């Protein structure tokens, strides 16, 4: 009888360990799914923040353009940018130009150096002083409408039309 009680106790302990392990795994799975869903929302917020930042930069550039008497080009000087993981200040070599001079339209909006996705990338780097690689954004250019689109898989896209200065954020979840 003693052996049978010992076997039953061992079996109960084993069941208790299995149940405990199962509960721990369930709790970890719930925490993991919550964490990874928040990572997607953080990257979506990142593109939303870049949209707001782009609006502020365009307003500042237009203000400078007006202040300087509406020149055909404008030199941007981003000396006081805080270098962080999301906003790395670029060296002039990576911009492909010797200085950060952008062409301006007659209406006061920054223009592309060349009508292509490469021109869109250069304009982003000049205006935002950050690299699109940090956002993992794909860049496309639409010739008909002259729109640059910066898009990410999980969080949507930002479109910039140089003719009108229009900036549109499209959330991929809507």
Image (cartoon, rainbow, N blue to C red):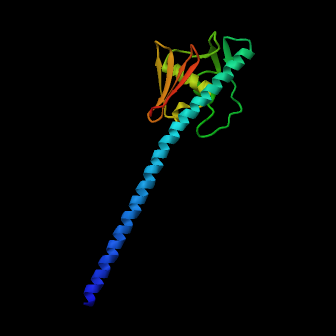
* Relative to 162, residue 52 above or below: below
* Residue 135 higher or lower than 112, as above or below: below
Which residue is depicted at the point 58% across and 34% down?
49
Q: Residue furthest front?
A: 174
Q: Is residue 99 something one can see in this rendering? A: no
Q: Is residue 84 left or right of residue 38?
A: right
Residue 142 x, y percent position in the rendering: 46, 17
Please tell me which residue lies in front, 68 or 159.
159
Q: Nearer the viewer, residue 170 or 46?
A: 170
- In the orientation shown, which residue stands out farthest toward the bottom? 1
Where in the figure is residue 33, as x and y percent of width and height? 43, 50
Does residue 18 appear anywhere in the picture? yes
The answer to whether residue 95 is left or right of residue 27 is: right
Q: Is residue 43 above or below residue 103?
A: below
Return the residue nearer the eye: 6 or 80: 6
Q: Pinpoint residue 145: horizontal percent, then vertical percent.
A: 48, 13
- Name the quadrant of the N terminus: bottom left
Give the image quarter of residue 126. Answer: top right
Residue 23 placed where, x, y %? 39, 63
Residue 160, relative to residue 152: is it above or below?
above
Q: Residue furthest top?
A: 106
Q: Is residue 121 left or right of residue 73?
A: left
Q: Identify the image quadrant of the C terminus.
A: top left
Q: How many marks?
A: 0
**What residue sits 30% from the left and 85% below the top?**
6
């Amino acid at each position: 009888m003693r052996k049978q009680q010992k076997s039953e106790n061992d079996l109960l302990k084993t069941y208790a360990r299995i149940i405990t392990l199962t509960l721990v795994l369930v709790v970890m799975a719930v925490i993991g799914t919550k964490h990874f869903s928040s990572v997607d929302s953080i990257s979506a917020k990142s593109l939303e923040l870049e949209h707001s930042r782009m609006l502020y930069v365009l307003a500042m550039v237009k203000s400078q353009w007006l202040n300087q008497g509406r020149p055909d080009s404008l030199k941007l000087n981003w000396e006081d940018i805080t270098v962080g993981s999301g906003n790395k200040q670029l060296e002039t070599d990576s911009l492909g130009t010797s200085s950060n001079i952008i062409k301006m339209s007659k209406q006061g909006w920054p223009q592309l150096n060349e009508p292509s996705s490469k021109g869109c990338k250069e304009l982003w780097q000049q205006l935002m002083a950050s690299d699109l690689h940090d956002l993992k954004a794909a860049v496309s250019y639409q010739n008909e409408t002259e729109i640059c689109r910066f898009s990410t898989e999980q969080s949507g896209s930002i479109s910039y039309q140089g003719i009108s200065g229009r900036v549109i954020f499209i959330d991929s979840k809507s």
